[in-house]
Amino acid sequence: MPTVSVIIPTCNRANYLKNAIESVIAQTFQDWELVVVDDGSTDDTAEFMKAYRQKGDKIRYVRQNCNQGVSAARNRAIRESSGKYVAFLDDDDQWFPYKLELQVSFMETHPDYGMCYSQLKIISPSANGSQKEVLFPPIVAGNFLELLHDCHILPSTAMVRRSCVKGDWFNPKMRLSEDQDLWLRLAQRTKIEPLEKVLATTIIDGRVHAAHDYIAVRKNTISLLKKLELVSEYRSYWWLKERHIARIRYELGRDYLDLKQYWMAAKYFAFALMTDPLVGLMVRRPGEQGFKIALRLAKSYAAVPLCLLKGIFYANR
């Protein structure tokens, strides 16, 4: 049984897959198995994987038909694997060579922790040859209440102790925010440690990614928070879950306002206020105090009628 099972779901990304796999092969920690689950690719992924399959049994290729989604692909790979720890890698991301070594070292010396995660470096090349680098996600404490407020852990940065999850890991009905759903369920049952190190990277090269649809992601996050069951220890914090739903609805209002879809903006601003009349406090900027907080609250209430007026004005033009 290997120490780490590395899981890569893929679909029509053969041109990215090589860099991801090679970053696993280059790890300083070598007691791993890699399971690549092909979620119904129609490109040359199967042909590309033949060379790796011939190198030995550390790398396995599993194909599932009908494009069942990333959740089903990851769940299938986990069932096909046996490692003590499970580490996820998206097919268009890469790990730094010491990623597994550092995370396994932490998990082995902290048996009461069920998960750890790191930061990821996002590289955005520009037309003039320069590049912009951003670290994501912002490191926050790994306890449930902190993650409920700000849960942006990326799969390629995470390592999970297998014994901490029973049944399906990812909700197969979810194609967005499925990772956030798992992290929040885990955070209620085990300790999560943020490692303040950059252990993975990705290059933004203009490819379309479902996570770039911020409106869809926010709506999916609202849906998962509504369905998220709280264990007995956190059941009294149901109101906090509602406050975060209100905040995301308010952010949706801003999204639609930016798109000049005023009726939709008014709808989500109104939903936010009905969920939490003090939602303005949740969206205030750092450092705002006194009069500025009062102004922020006033703006949250003014958003609905202003959007309605704009909607009427532009509808009659």
Image (cartoon, rainbow, N blue to C red):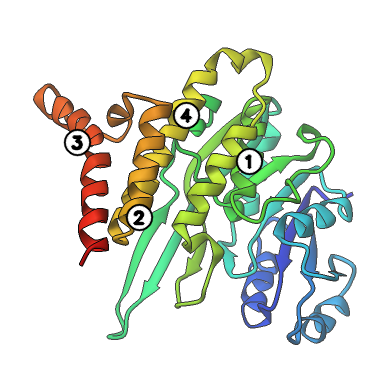
Which sits earlier in the primary sequence, circle 4 or circle 3?
A: 4
Residue topped by disc 4: 146
Residue topped by disc 2: 256
Q: Do residues under tags 2 and 3 come within 8 Å of each other at their CB atoms?
A: no
Instruction: Name the kind of residue labelled 1 in the image.
Output: Asp
**Picture coordinates of residue 235, whole percent (x, y):** 61, 15
Which sits earlier in the primary sequence, circle 4 or circle 1?
A: 4
Instruction: Name the kind of residue labelled 2 in the image.
Output: Tyr
Q: Hey, which quadrant is residue 292 in on the image?
A: top left
Residue topped by disc 3: 299
Which sits earlier in the primary sequence, circle 2 or circle 4?
A: 4
Between the C-alphas of marks 1 and 3, the distance is 32 Å
Instruction: Name the kind of residue labelled 4 in the image.
Output: Glu
**Picture coordinates of residue 197, whole percent (x, y):** 47, 48
Which sits earlier in the primary sequence, circle 1 or circle 2?
A: 1
Q: Residues within 10 Å of mark 2 (few under 14, many from 20)?
A: many
